[in-house]
Image: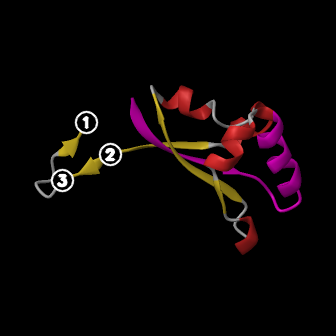
Amino acid sequence: METYLVISEHTAEDCKRALQYFHDYHEGYLVKFWWGCMDHDHNGYAIIEADNHEHAKMSVPPLIRDKARIIRLVHFEKTLAHRE
């Protein structure tokens, strides 16, 4: 398993609909995401464990999945060798 940052973008106009998509898709994912909407940043952010980019992208509902950004994260120790 690897660690991924998932960013789910939506517009201000689609904010309520995006949250409803998350609720309807899998209510558990709604609470895994942090939302910037209250500060005019219409993105959901989550750090999740997944096997690969495609599996991480599955955390976003299908209707808005095409806008999602998936970024694999690594942690560097003081020696700059990344932790697996």
Distance between the Cα atoms at labels 2 and 1? 8 Å
Task: Please state the horizontal and vertical placement of residue 49, each as a whole percent of the image.
Answer: 46, 36
Q: How is the image coloured?
A: secondary structure
In the rendered image, the quadrant that contains the C terminus is top left
Which residue bears the numbered disc 3? Answer: 77
Q: Which mark is residue 32?
A: none
Q: 26 or 44: nearer the eye?
A: 26
The span picked out in magenta is 1-24
- The amino acid type of the residue labelled 1 equals Glu
- The label on residue 74 is 2
| Residue at 64% from the left image edge and 43% from the top image edge | 68
Residue picked out by circle 1 = 84
- 10 Å crowding of disc 1: few (<14), some (14-19), many (20+): few
Q: Amino acid at mark 3?
A: Glu
Residue 39, image x, y percentages: 71, 74
Secondary element under disc 1, as helix, strand or loop, is loop
Asked whether the residues under the numbered discs 2 and 3 touch, taking CB atoms below 8 Å apart as contact, a structural biologist would say no
Task: State how far apart marks 2 and 3 are (Cα).
Answer: 10 Å
To which quarter of the image does residue 55 belong? Answer: top right
